[in-house]
């Protein structure tokens, strides 16, 4: 019977092709959204890993994650180094990496931290931040840059750069009395680390010597770096601190003890929880699009059923002939279902080829520009589920014309 | 005896009941059923072929009585033992002439085993019916009416079903073509194994048949 279904579809090639195209478009839209969404979600969840807690000034978790992980927005408060040092002695803590934010370089955020940052902060599935070239900063005047920074500004190892106070490019705000030398360039990670400039906290403290309320009171150009007392460059405040715990069991007790810290209003947040809260806001747009693609699929299926039903009158003869040669009404009705199945399969195969092909071709672009790494697998288990659903929906909606055919074949004899 | 029908009555609603005369077809027998339009020819045809369920009376084909058979069993009986020819539009337009003819074997393993080589059997019947060989692979929609009717005959004969049932097979043909067609049909059908029932209102056909049964006009 499948050859009859195929032949009958070929006889209606134009209408069938249009239906297949519209169904394919809807599927491609759904599939690419699904892939981009899961890639974005993965990239999003994996922008930071290996960090159990982020300690910062008391504020909402989303806010803290936004500026410490995504370098978006502006910290409202700092926390004192005294508090950080005090918390660092807590027995639950395995490691603690403080960061100070505020400066920028050509609109890329500067993260002032300690060299241990590159050991502790992980991205993706626990991948270390690897160096494409060079190494981490060791000295006050050394700087490490992310892959995007190096790429867009065409920077190389050994180049000198100045940092800008705050995130603006306003004249007179540049720390032009102290140059940093690039010693390392990170590999691309698809995380905000690619767009960051990393300096040592002490160097960061140094360039802010003599700054008060955002303006320079005196320069440090003539400062003798070898004569600075070691304690003078110890920062008084930082923006936040990333924390790793010895045991996950200590997580909630430790969070409580941070949140109840008596000397200063600080809070500890669990990045995963804050990220998923953030995603529930960011992901809304995705859900709207997903809903729209399902709507388009529904419309395409309705088009298919409409086409089938409107062709039934023209095919009454065909049904009668099949009855005459001994086909049961059930078999004739199954012809309609087979046609729907062929249309559905054609659309699904086209959609998989189109999406896989284009993700394959665009994967470098997506990874570099958007920091997302979509699955280039031909098809994933989730997608098989989606296709199975759509396929079933196609067959189910074709039950209507199939039943119509069945009843017609039952009631109508050979009369002309 | 190939086919027998007795005391067959069919009622469409409470008012209209059709009563059909007894009907019997022996091997090699050619039966013409005549009657004005509206006398129930189509209904009788549908009953004989088992498309309409038998309500009252007795019908049997090759000793198998229709009474109590399921729709599925009647479909199989038709596939195996009856070749049907319609008035017009006998063919599926998007299939080739040969594939249209071969449809006859699709639902009947029994008829398929009787045909050793479909292509050769098609060619033999196609020759006997005066069809040019090259139309075998043409789509049915490109064939003339006369050619289409002959392909329908090939379909009805393929695999030697015991009963050939034709509904006004010549109504779309002019008188000359009708005579030619009837001659070809009569010479193609196997008088040693098959029986033929033709329904028509054309009195000119009488000459071709052994038995003529006339249905009364409905009151």
Image (cartoon, coloured by chain):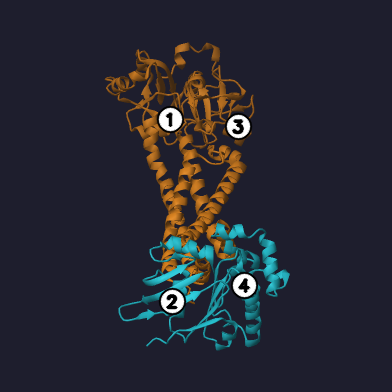
What x and y, as percent, mark residue B96? 64, 66
Q: Colour of chain B?
A: cyan
What x and y, as percent, mark residue A243? 40, 21
Residue B144 visible, this angle: no
Chain of the residue where label 1 is placed in the rendered structure: A
Using the rendered image, report if marks 3 and 4 lie on a common chain.
Answer: no
> How much space separates mark 3 and mark 4, taking CA atoms?
89 Å
Chain of the residue where label 4 is placed in the rendered structure: B
Callouts 4 and 2 close, C-beta under 8 Å:
no
* Residue at mark 3: A150
> How much space separates mark 1 and mark 4, taking CA atoms?
92 Å
Q: Residue at x 65, y 80 (%)?
A: B183
Q: Colour of chain A?
A: orange
Q: Residue at x 56, y 62 (%)?
A: A9
Q: Residue at x 41, y 42 (%)?
A: A282
Q: Quadrant of residue B22?
A: bottom left
> How much space separates mark 4 and mark 2, taking CA atoms?
25 Å
What x and y, as percent, mark residue A275? 40, 34
What x and y, as percent, mark residue B173? 61, 83
Q: Which mark is residue B43?
A: 2
Nearest the eye: A366 or A199: A366
Relative to A326, A269 lies left or right: left
> How much space separates mark 2 and mark 1, taking CA atoms?
85 Å
């Amino acid at each position: 019977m499948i050859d009859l279904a195929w032949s009958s579809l070929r006889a209606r090639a134009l209408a069938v092709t249009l239906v297949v195209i519209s169904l394919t478009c809807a599927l491609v839209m759904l599939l690419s959204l699904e892939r981009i969404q899961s890639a974005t979600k993965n990239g999003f969840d994996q922008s930071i890993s290996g960090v159990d807690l982020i300690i910062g000034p008391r504020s909402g978790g989303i806010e803290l994650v936004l500026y410490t992980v995504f370098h978006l927005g502006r910290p409202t408060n700092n926390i004192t180094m005294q508090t950080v040092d005090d918390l660092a002695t807590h027995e639950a803590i395995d490691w603690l990496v403080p960061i100070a934010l505020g400066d920028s370089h050509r609109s890329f955020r500067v993260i002032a931290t300690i060299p241990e940052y590159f050991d502790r902060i992980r991205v993706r599935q626990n991948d270390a931040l690897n160096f494409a070239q060079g190494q981490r900063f060791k000295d006050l005047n050394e700087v490490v840059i992310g892959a995007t920074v190096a790429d867009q500004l065409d920077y190389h190892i050994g180049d000198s750069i100045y940092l800008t106070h705050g995130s603006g490019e306003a004249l007179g705000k540049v720390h032009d009395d102290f140059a940093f030398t690039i010693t390392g360039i990170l590999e691309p990670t698809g995380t905000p680390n690619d767009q960051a400039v990393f300096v040592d906290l002490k160097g960061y403290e140094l360039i802010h010597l003599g700054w008060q309320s955002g303006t320079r009171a005196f320069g440090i150009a003539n400062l003798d770096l070898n004569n600075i007392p070691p304690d003078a460059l110890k920062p008084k405040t930082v923006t936040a601190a990333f924390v790793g715990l010895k045991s996950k069991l200590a997580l909630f007790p430790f969070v409580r003890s941070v949140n109840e810290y008596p000397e200063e209003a600080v809070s500890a947040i669990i990045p995963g929880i804050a990220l998923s809260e953030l995603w529930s806001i960011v992901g809304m747009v995705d859900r709207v699009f997903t809903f729209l693609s399902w709507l388009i699929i529904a419309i395409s299926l309705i088009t298919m059923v409409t086409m089938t039903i409107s062709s039934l009158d023209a095919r009454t003869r065909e049904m009668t002939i099949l009855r005459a040669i001994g086909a049961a009404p059930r078999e004739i009705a199954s012809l309609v279902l087979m046609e729907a199945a062929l249309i559905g399969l054609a659309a699904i195969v086209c959609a998989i080829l189109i999406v896989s092909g284009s993700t394959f071709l665009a994967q470098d672009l997506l990874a570099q520009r958007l920091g997302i790494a979509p699955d280039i697998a031909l098809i994933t288990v989730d997608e098989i589920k989606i296709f199975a659903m759509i396929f079933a929906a196609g067959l189910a909606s074709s039950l209507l014309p199939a039943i119509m055919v069945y009843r017609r074949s039952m009631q109508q004899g050979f009369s002309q | 005896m190939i086919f027998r029908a007795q005391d067959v009555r069919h009622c469409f609603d409470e008012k209209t009941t059709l009563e059909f005369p007894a009907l019997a077809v022996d091997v090699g027998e050619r039966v013409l059923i005549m009657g004005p339009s509206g006398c129930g020819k189509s209904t009788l045809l549908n009953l004989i072929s088992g498309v309409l369920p038998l309500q009252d009376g007795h019908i049997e084909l090759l000793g198998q009585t229709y009474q109590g058979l399921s729709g599925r069993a009647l479909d199989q009986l038709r596939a195996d033992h009856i070749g049907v020819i319609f008035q017009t539009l006998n063919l599926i337009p998007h299939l080739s002439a040969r594939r249209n003819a071969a449809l006859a074997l699709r639902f009947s393993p029994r008829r398929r085993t009787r045909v050793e080589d479909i292509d050769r059997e098609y060619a033999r019947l196609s020759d006997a019916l005066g069809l040019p060989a090259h139309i075998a692979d043409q789509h049915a929609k490109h064939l003339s009416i006369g050619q289409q009717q002959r392909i329908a005959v090939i379909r009805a004969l393929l695999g030697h079903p015991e009963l050939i049932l034709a509904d006004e097979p010549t109504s779309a043909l002019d008188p000359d073509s009708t005579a030619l067609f009837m001659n070809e049909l009569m010479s193609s059908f196997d008088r040693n194994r098959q029986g033929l029932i033709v329904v028509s209102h054309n009195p000119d056909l009488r000459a071709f048949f052994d038995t003529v049964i006339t249905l009364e006009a409905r009151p």
